[in-house]
Image (spheres, helix red, strand yellow):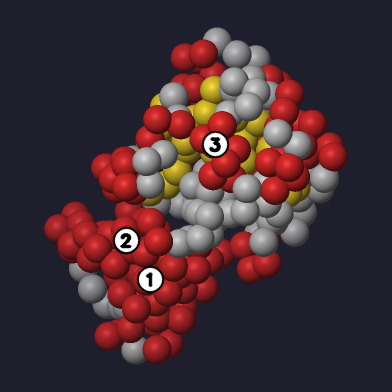
């Protein structure tokens, strides 16, 4: 834990994932994906949920065409957009109402080390902007990158924009997608681990953290 805290405190720029790092909202989205496809039978719905949970951090615009194909539905842009909108309507308020990862809200709002905070998420841009506004969290971030910008590209853009060496930054995420995006940019990665979200991270041997209460307690 002390190494993880030192890694965070030493960084000049922190790249934050949202679901599972700031809000404990991963389960909310798992349930929503399952419910969205429940009319196609319980087997398809469960298959969708398992796939989603094993591929966290990937945009719904990449996942839903796969699920539509499984359900025997067309995968044209109109159908994908329709299902994405339904999904957004199901999860947006639920994400807002989800519990905070312990300690993170205080750390974000106080920003005790005057760090640059950048949000990097697979949630669509307009949707994450709405969520952050509802939580009065928008002002905590210098920049916000949502879908369709990939996490890999978002991190690269942040490094170029603020002209920082990768070792002076850290990415906090809870999925293999987050880890791979950090690796692609040579940015140190901090894994927020919590139960089922560890799927796909079996090979990870780096620093990890379960919550941010130790950081808050040291403020």
Marks 1 and 3, how far apart at CA: 29 Å
Q: Quadrant of the C terminus?
A: top right
Local crowd size for mark 2, using a 10 Å CA cut-off: few (<14), some (14–19), many (≥20): few
Residue 78, visible in the rendered structure: yes
The reply to whether discs 3 and 2 touch (Cβ–Cβ < 8 Å) is no
Marks 2 and 1, how far apart at CA: 15 Å
Dot placed on the residue nearer the N-terminal end, 3 or 2? 2
On the image, the x and y values in percent for residue 176 come to 61, 51
Q: Horizontally, is 186 left or right of 75 in the view? A: right
Residue under label 2: 93
Residue under label 3: 108
Using the image, determine if residue 50 lies above or below residue 7: below
Q: Please tell me which residue is depicted at 72% across the width and 28% down the height of the picture.
A: 9
Q: Please tell me which residue is depicted at 27% across the width and 77% down the height of the picture.
A: 72
Local crowd size for mark 1, using a 10 Å CA cut-off: few (<14), some (14–19), many (≥20): many
Local crowd size for mark 3, using a 10 Å CA cut-off: few (<14), some (14–19), many (≥20): some
For this rendering, which residue is in front, 58 or 144? Answer: 144
Q: Horizontally, is 50 left or right of 48 in the view? A: right
Using the image, determine if residue 89 lies above or below residue 103: below
For this rendering, which residue is in front, 199 or 143? Answer: 143
Tag of residue 33: 1
């Amino acid at each position: 834990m002390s190494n993880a805290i030192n890694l965070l405190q030493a960084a000049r720029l922190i790249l934050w994932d949202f679901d599972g790092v700031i809000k404990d909202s991963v389960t909310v989205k798992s349930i929503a994906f399952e419910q969205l496809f429940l009319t196609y039978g319980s087997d398809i719905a469960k298959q969708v949920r398992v796939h989603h949970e094993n591929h966290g951090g990937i945009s719904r615009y990449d996942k839903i065409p796969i699920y539509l194909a499984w359900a025997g539905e067309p995968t044209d842009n109109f159908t994908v957009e329709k299902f994405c909108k339904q999904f957004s309507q199901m999860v947006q308020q639920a994400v807002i109402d989800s519990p905070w990862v312990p300690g993170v809200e205080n750390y974000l709002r106080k920003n005790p080390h005057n760090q640059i905070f950048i949000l990097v998420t697979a949630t669509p841009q307009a949707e994450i902007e709405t969520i952050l506004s509802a939580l009065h969290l928008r002002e905590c971030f210098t920049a916000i990158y949502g879908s369709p910008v990939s996490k890999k590209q978002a991190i690269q853009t942040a490094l170029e924009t603020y002209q920082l060496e990768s070792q002076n930054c850290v990415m906090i995420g809870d999925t293999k997608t987050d880890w791979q995006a950090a690796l692609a940019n040579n940015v140190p990665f901090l894994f927020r681990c919590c139960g089922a979200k560890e799927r796909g991270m079996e090979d990870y041997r780096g620093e990890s953290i379960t919550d941010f209460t130790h950081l808050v307690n040291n403020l």
